[in-house]
Image (cartoon, grey):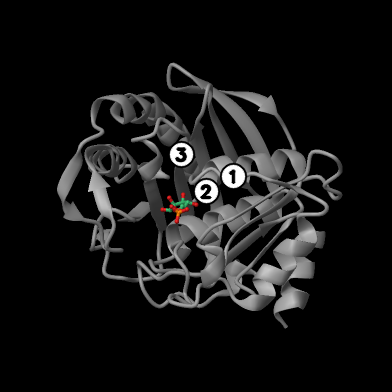
Amino acid sequence: MSDATTEEVFDVVAATAPEIRATLVDRVGFESEENPSGEKQIAADVHADRLLEERLRPIDGVNEYASEERDELVTDGDGEDEGYGVAVDPVDGSSNIETNNAAGTIVGIYDGALPASGDKLVGAAYVLYGPRTTMVAATEGSVTEYVIEDGDRAVVREDVRIPDEAGDKGVFGFGGRVSEWPAEVEAFVREIEQELKLRYSGAMIGDINQVLSYGGIFAYPPLRSAPESKLRLLYEGNPIGYIVEAAGGRSSDGDRSILEVPPEDLHQRVPVHIGTTEYVDRLEAALD
Ligand code: F6P
């Protein structure tokens, strides 16, 4: 096992991104099936999942493939803790496709059998299909931003750091209905709306990318009707927590780093609060 495997995973995701972007235009219809989390799949979800599985599995050192869009783990091994397990959200924010808003792809590379804890991540990346196709990748404690053209990634920013202080441009975005939030979350939001601008897009990747650029906080908190909230630990909470922590920020499930949440299930959900350290600290204190 080497970093070469992580870099190859990033290369394959970058090489596949233009095709995934094209499927967001061509395959917008709904499938008859739901994904394992009970959400309607669009054809692009299914196609992007197939493309990624087909290309990531042959990589030397990758023994397992898990995806938000399929029930079962695809594995070469016998569940032994050897080799890397790659977990993907092929199209993050797929409900945004209908309205022509941003979407993304997320990948987490775990050193061990899946489901693994976020502490086992050796790399993570996301692709943002915005006006440009960009990729933000983290490994070995450093974060790099790339622009993807013709399937190749070119560095636009090395050593990406989340601003320590949000400043004038700082943003926040919280998912779920306000009436469903715990009272402490609502009170916290009333406080930070005096300091940050509200921006919520419906695609975690779009929201996280602006928090990483401007500082602030993104959250999908626990809901009264769903204490585990909406986002998935393996495909969303962990990889994005890993990237933002490597950029100097924090992630939390409400009282600890998301990377410390014990994994029990491939499709486990987790409350997600991610961003500038100060805001995540304050939110945790409010929930205490
Ligand atoms: O699948 C997850 C997701 O699409 C995230 O990208 C996004 O943050 C969230 O769901 C949006 O949920 P809602 O439609 O409830 O705002």
User: Residue 266: where, in percent of width, then height?
Assistant: 35, 68
Q: In the displayed structure, would residue 113 be above or below residue 123?
A: below
Residue drawn at 54 percent across, 49 percent down: 124
**Residue farthest toward the bottom in the current orientation of the protein:** 288
Residue drawn at 64 percent across, 25 percent down: 155
Q: On the image, numbered disc 3 is attached to which residue?
A: 104
Disc sitting over residue 204 in the figure: 2
Label 1 crowd bin: few (<14), some (14–19), many (20+), radius 10 Å: many
Q: On the image, numbered disc 1 is attached to which residue?
A: 207
* Amino acid at circle 3: Gly
Disc sitting over residue 116 in the figure: none
Label 2 crowd bin: few (<14), some (14–19), many (20+), radius 10 Å: many
**Closer to the camera: disc 1 or disc 3?**
1
Element type at mark 1: helix
For label 3, being within 8 Å of ligand 1 is answered yes
User: Residue 288: where, in percent of width, then height?
Assistant: 72, 83
Q: Is residue 19 left or right of residue 175?
A: left
Q: Nearer the viewer, residue 288 or 83?
A: 288
Nearer-N-terminus badge (2/3)? 3
Nearer-N-terminus badge (1/3)? 3
For label 2, being within 8 Å of ligand 1 is answered yes
* Amino acid at circle 1: Asp
Judge whether residue 271 can be spotted in this image. Answer: no
Residue drawn at 51 percent across, 71 percent down: 180
Q: Is residue 26 left or right of residue 113?
A: left
**Residue farthest toward the top in the current orientation of the protein:** 150
* Amino acid at circle 2: Met
Q: From mark 2 to mark 3, how far is it between C-alphas?
A: 8 Å
Q: From mark 1 to mark 3, how far is it between C-alphas?
A: 11 Å
Asked whether the residues under the numbered discs 2 and 3 touch, taking CB atoms below 8 Å apart as contact, a structural biologist would say yes
